[in-house]
Amino acid sequence: MDIYSTSINGRYRKGTGTSDATAIVAGAAALVRSKYPYLPAAEVIHRLTATAVDKGPPGRDDEYGYGVIDLVAALTADVPPLGFEGATATPPGGATSAAQPAGADGDGGAAVRGWVTLGVIVAAGGGFLVWRRHRRADDPPPRISR
């Protein structure tokens, strides 16, 4: 699946995979957290997965995960809390959502996968910050001309 993101010189680029999706998912989680500041992390993950637009085989799969993030739905849909996996998210206006709720694949491991995914995102971000700090430490100081 193609993921469009910003690139150098004010351009956009097309990428694929978790490396390109990480920033988008982290930004979506931050927006959900900003709208619902007291929502526990598991509920933020649940809100994102329950409102995602399913792609590929029905339910969670190895290629698309829970699908494509629908940020508007994640921020506005009436999403039942965890523990009500049989219910689906209801978008504003009462339209039926095409999203699969967390746990709909029947294996009961949706919360664990969500926590693991969040851990990978946090670890990747931390690794980037360490790499960036190390890279800056190796760079020569900027030259100041007068």
Image (spheres, helix red, strand yellow):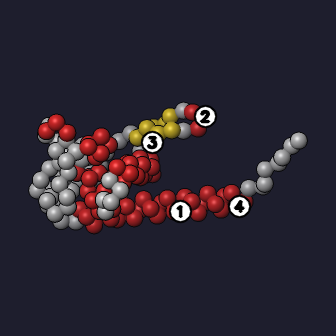
Q: Are marks 3 and 1 in contact (CB under 8 Å)?
A: no
Residue 121 in the image, given as x and y percentages of width and height: 42, 59
Where disc 2 sits, the SS reads helix
Residue 21, numbered circle: none
Task: Provide the secondary structure element on which disc 1 rests.
Answer: helix
Question: Which residue shows up at 19% across the image and 58% down it?
Answer: 81
Mark 1, residue position? 127
Q: CA distance from mark 3 to mark 2?
A: 17 Å
Q: Which is closer to the viewer, label 3 or label 2?
A: 2
Of residues 53 and 36, the one drawn nearer to the viewer in this rendering: 36
Residue that lies at the very extreme toward the right in this rendered image: 146
Q: Is residue 32 left or right of residue 15?
A: left
Q: In the rendered image, which residue does mark 3 sit on?
A: 15
Whether tag 3 and tag 2 are in contact, CB under 8 A, the answer is no
Residue at the disc numbered 2: 9
Q: Circle 3: is it few (<14), some (14-19), or many (20+) Cα within 10 Å?
A: some
Of residues 37 and 73, the one nearer the viewer is 37
Asked if residue 101 shows in the view, the reply is: yes
Query: How much space separates mark 3 and mark 1, taking CA atoms?
Result: 20 Å
